[in-house]
Amino acid sequence: RVIAAVPTSVLGGAGIVLFGTVAASGIRTLSKVDYRNNMNLIIVATSIGFGMIPIAAPSFYDHFPSWFATIFHSGISSSAIMAILLNLAFNHFTAGNSDQQSVFVAGTERSLCFQDVAALRDGDYFSGGKLFDAEGKEIPLLEEVPKKAAVHGRAQTSEV
């Protein structure tokens, strides 16, 4: 009787705080994950996508066996199961995997062309996302390779 006497607006407010706390805790946990040189970004993205299926298309699992639909009809359980399975597949069961990184992981690494580094001079430095020379003058950065230099496969500018 005591619980039944609590107004629904109070229960709704408590539910919002409860689920918000769970979501914030999950985000905090995911912020500690190393997303470089492994498949963790793909695992998280795919798991969240699977968790969105029951929300976006509630009847998606209706044609699956009832035991499967019962488990995967919840976005939380389908995300958790998918994250566990993908983590095992990509990060733990590595027998027979290639030494080469996947295209997804290879695209996350930063790299510079030798020509770009060779064009730097002593004293050049970056600050606030801008390139400066030794005297503190800003050096303009080109967003794309000039068309006449692109024919030769490298940028030929006097700026950098």
Image: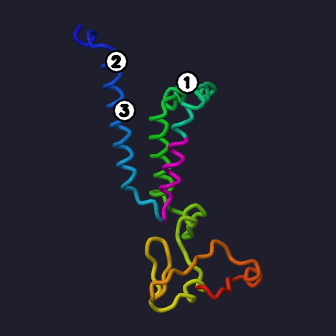
Q: Nearer the viewer, mark 3 or mark 2?
A: 2
Which badge, 3 or 2, comes first in the chain's sequence?
Answer: 2
Q: Amino acid at mark 1?
A: Ser
Decide which of 145, 69 is in the foreground and name it. 145
Q: Residue 118, how many percent across, how many down?
A: 56, 89
Q: Quadrant of residue 13?
A: top left
Q: Is residue 39 magenta?
A: yes
Q: Secondary structure at mark 3?
A: helix
Disc on res. 19:
3
Q: Nearer the viewer, mark 3 or mark 1?
A: 3
Q: Distance of mark 3 from mark 2, alpha carbons?
A: 15 Å
Q: Amino acid at mark 3?
A: Phe
Q: Amino acid at mark 2?
A: Ser
Crowdedness near tag 2: few (<14), some (14–19) or many (≥20) residues, C-alpha within 10 Å:
few
Disc on res. 9:
2
The magenta-colored residue range is 37-49
Which residue bears the numbered disc 1?
66
Q: Secondary structure at mark 1?
A: helix
Q: Residue 87, how many percent across, how many down?
A: 46, 52
Q: Quadrant of residue 33?
A: bottom left
Q: Residue 62, how many percent across, how many down?
A: 61, 24
Q: Residue at x 58, y 83 (%)?
A: 116
Q: Distance of mark 3 from mark 1, alpha carbons?
A: 27 Å
Which badge, 2 or 1, comes first in the chain's sequence?
Answer: 2
Q: Residue at x 34, y 18 (%)?
A: 9
Are the residues flagged by discs 3 and 1 in contact, CB closer than 8 Å?
A: no
Q: Is residue 77 above or below residue 67?
A: below
